[in-house]
Image (cartoon, rainbow, N blue to C red):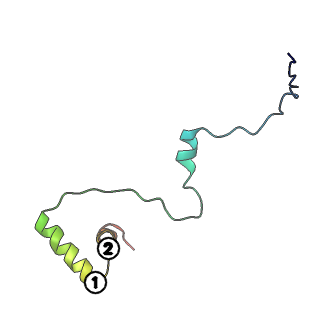
């Protein structure tokens, strides 16, 4: 039976330290890209949802876009 010899190379040189996962998550949005989004969930009556959905369908818009615009008008002062 023959034995197979494997040579082990020299120890790798120091590599740049990778940031921890928490650090990456905390700083990943700090670029010149768009602002990160957050999800908002609300409960509304079924009849109101049906009305909003029908109006948005007639205008060809999305409910999320309409609600986002209303929130911007109310809370973001120009």
Q: Residue furthest top?
A: 1
Q: CA distance from mark 1 to mark 2?
A: 9 Å
**Helix, strand or loop under label 1:** helix
When the figure is inspected, residue 71 is found, relative to residue 23, above or below; the finding is: below
Q: Which residue is mark 1?
A: 59
> Residue visible at 86% across and 18% down?
3
When the figure is inspected, residue 40 is found, relative to residue 5, above or below; the finding is: below
Quadrant (top left, top right, bottom left, bottom right) of the C terminus: bottom left
Near-viewer residue (61 or 7): 7
> Residue visible at 24% across and 83% down?
58
> Residue visible at 84% across and 28% down?
11
Left or right of 60, for residue 24: right
Q: Which residue is mark 2?
A: 62
When the figure is inspected, residue 20 is found, relative to residue 32, above or below; the finding is: above
Near-viewer residue (66 or 7): 7
Q: Residue furthest front?
A: 1
Quadrant (top left, top right, bottom left, bottom right) of the N terminus: top right
């Amino acid at each position: 039976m023959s034995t197979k010899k494997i040579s082990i190379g020299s120890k790798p040189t120091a590599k740049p330290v990778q940031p921890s996962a928490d650090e990456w998550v905390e700083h990943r949005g700090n670029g010149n890209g768009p602002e990160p989004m957050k999800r908002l969930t609300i409960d509304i009556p079924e009849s109101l949802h049906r009305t909003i959905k029908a109006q948005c369908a007639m205008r060809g818009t999305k409910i999320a876009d309409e609600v986002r615009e209303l929130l911007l008008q109310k809370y973001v002062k120009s």
